[in-house]
Image: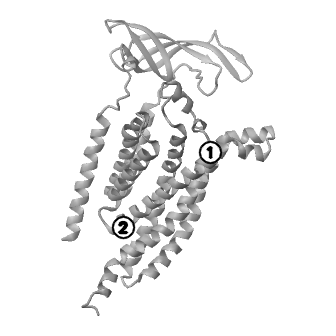
């Protein structure tokens, strides 16, 4: 009877999160720009002709402009052929050199009647279809492999993505405290994810308590060492562009600190769930385990978990900086200069603070789990009837 009640509660909660996710996806962020959509269409097109006569090569850099002929594949102007330009600025990071047959995202401008195209620009390669295909394969595999749990995992993935886009980012742009908003969003999404996967159970309560404790400690460490390291918020790519866009009131340093514990939140939650699930299995197989034994077992489980998870963070963060390290090595830059550079120091701070949070969340979750899983047993042993 109790199991049926739990299943019903879990189904109701899953439906509620599905509805909330749908509503969040539909509501506007408040930062929509009508100028970007007024008499403007963004459609899929294929490159039918290319003229590279104006391009000039200077070593590894290409500048100039491509003249393109594009056939529109979607929208109200489907099957129309337009001429477009692709200007190369000599910046390899953003420049694209299109070839015949490439699928591109074309930006179309229309006249006041909205019936005639006045200009066209090839914006970038068209990747949206591939993204949906990849997401669909991910979703299908997840559901086929884990069934109902897989569906809930997929829902938690979607809910977290929508919450970040529709709540976290808009509220920070509106000037609210990045640290407080980030903590709130991380706490809400962590709660939803754990309850979706574990249901309203002791296992979920232990994992949630451990994860929140771990994220809180990570936040404090990020605040303290972020200040001591003197790393400006502008170390993050595109951060200065936000200021130029008119959001000069934003505290970029606080946003940078928020990014540290947001990045570590997922790994912290994983460790907390691993410890909680293991302790739950131990106590279900051996209900006679006392609190001390369960703590020791939790610690024993934690050792290999934190041993691999800390290295996981190192891989995750250093992978994005491989080109930077290659450049430093190619130039023969001294190690002291490398580690003292603010963007390298920022990644070191990210890695060490996140790893520190992982090391602490494991024993914390083990202790919390030992108390919660043995709570009834302790109460029973202290009751007058048991005496």
Name the residue nearer the viewer: 289 or 93.
289
Name the residue nearer the viewer: 327 or 173.
173
Name the residue nearer the viewer: 140 or 386.
386
Residue at image point 53% right, 64% down: 360
Element type at mark 1:
helix
Which corner quadrant holds the C terminus? bottom left
Q: In 3D space, how far apart are the residues under numbered discs 1 and 2 (Cα atoms)? A: 35 Å
**Furthest-left residue in this view:** 1
Counting from the top left corner in percent of width and height, residue 250 is at 49, 34
Which mark is nearer the camera, 1 or 2? 1
Q: With 358 as the anchor, is 169 left or right in this view?
A: left
Q: Which residue is mark 2?
A: 203
Residue at image point 38% right, 82% down: 286
For mark 1, does the 10 Å Cα neighbourhood hold few (<14), some (14 to 19), or many (20 or more) residues?
many
From this view, report whether residue 275 is shown above or below residue 138: below
Residue at image point 32% right, 37% down: 25
Q: How many marks?
A: 2
Element type at mark 2:
helix
Q: With 11 as the anchor, is 37 left or right in this view?
A: right
Res 346 label:
1
Residue at image point 73% right, 44% down: 338
Residue 193 sits in quarter? bottom left
Pointer 1 or 2: first along the chain: 2
Residue 51 sits in quarter? top right
Circles 1 and 2 in contact, beta carbons < 8 Å: no
Res 100 label:
none
Counting from the top left corner in percent of width and height, residue 96 is at 58, 23
Counting from the top left corner in percent of width and height, residue 100 is at 54, 19
For mark 2, does the 10 Å Cα neighbourhood hold few (<14), some (14 to 19), or many (20 or more) residues?
many
Which corner quadrant holds the N terminus? bottom left
Whether residue 51 is visible? no
């Amino acid at each position: 009877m109790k199991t049926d009640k739990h299943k019903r509660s879990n189904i109701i909660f899953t439906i509620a999160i599905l509805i909330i996710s749908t509503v969040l996806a539909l509501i506007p962020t408040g930062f929509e720009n009508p100028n970007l959509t007024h008499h403007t269409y963004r459609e899929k097109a294929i490159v039918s002709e290319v003229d590279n006569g104006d391009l000039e090569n200077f070593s590894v850099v290409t500048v100039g402009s491509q003249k393109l002929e594009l056939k529109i594949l979607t929208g109200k102007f489907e099957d129309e052929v337009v001429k477009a330009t692709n200007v190369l600025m000599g910046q390899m990071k953003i420049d694209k050199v299109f070839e015949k047959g490439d699928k591109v995202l074309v930006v179309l401008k229309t006249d006041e009647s909205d019936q005639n195209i006045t200009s066209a620009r090839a914006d970038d390669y068209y990747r949206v279809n591939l993204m949906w295909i990849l997401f669909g394969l991910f979703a299908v595999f997840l559901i086929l492999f884990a069934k109902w749990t897989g569906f809930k995992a997929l829902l938690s993935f979607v809910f977290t993505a929508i919450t970040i886009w529709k709540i976290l980012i808009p509220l920070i742009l509106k000037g609210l405290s990045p640290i407080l908003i980030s903590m709130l969003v991380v706490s809400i999404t962590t709660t939803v994810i754990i309850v979706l996967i574990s249901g309203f159970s002791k296992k979920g309560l232990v994992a949630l308590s451990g994860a929140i404790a771990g994220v809180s400690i990570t936040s404090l460490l990020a605040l303290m060492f972020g200040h001591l390291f003197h790393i400006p918020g502008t170390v993050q790519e595109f951060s200065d562009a936000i200021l130029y866009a008119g959001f000069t009131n934003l505290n970029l340093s606080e946003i940078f600190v928020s990014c540290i514990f947001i990045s570590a939140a997922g790994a912290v939650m994983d460790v907390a769930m691993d410890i909680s699930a293991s302790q739950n299995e131990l106590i279900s197989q051996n209900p006679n385990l006392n609190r001390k034994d369960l703590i020791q077992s939790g610690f024993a489980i934690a050792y290999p978990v934190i041993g691999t998870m800390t290295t996981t963070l190192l891989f995750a963060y250093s992978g994005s900086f491989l080109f930077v390290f290659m450049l430093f090595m190619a130039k023969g830059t001294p190690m002291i200069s490398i580690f003292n550079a603010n963007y390298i120091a920022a990644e070191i701070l990210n890695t060490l603070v996140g790893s520190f949070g992982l090391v602490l969340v494991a024993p914390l979750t083990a202790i919390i789990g030992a108390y919660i899983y043995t709570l009834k047993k302790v109460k029973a042993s202290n009751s007058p009837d048991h005496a």
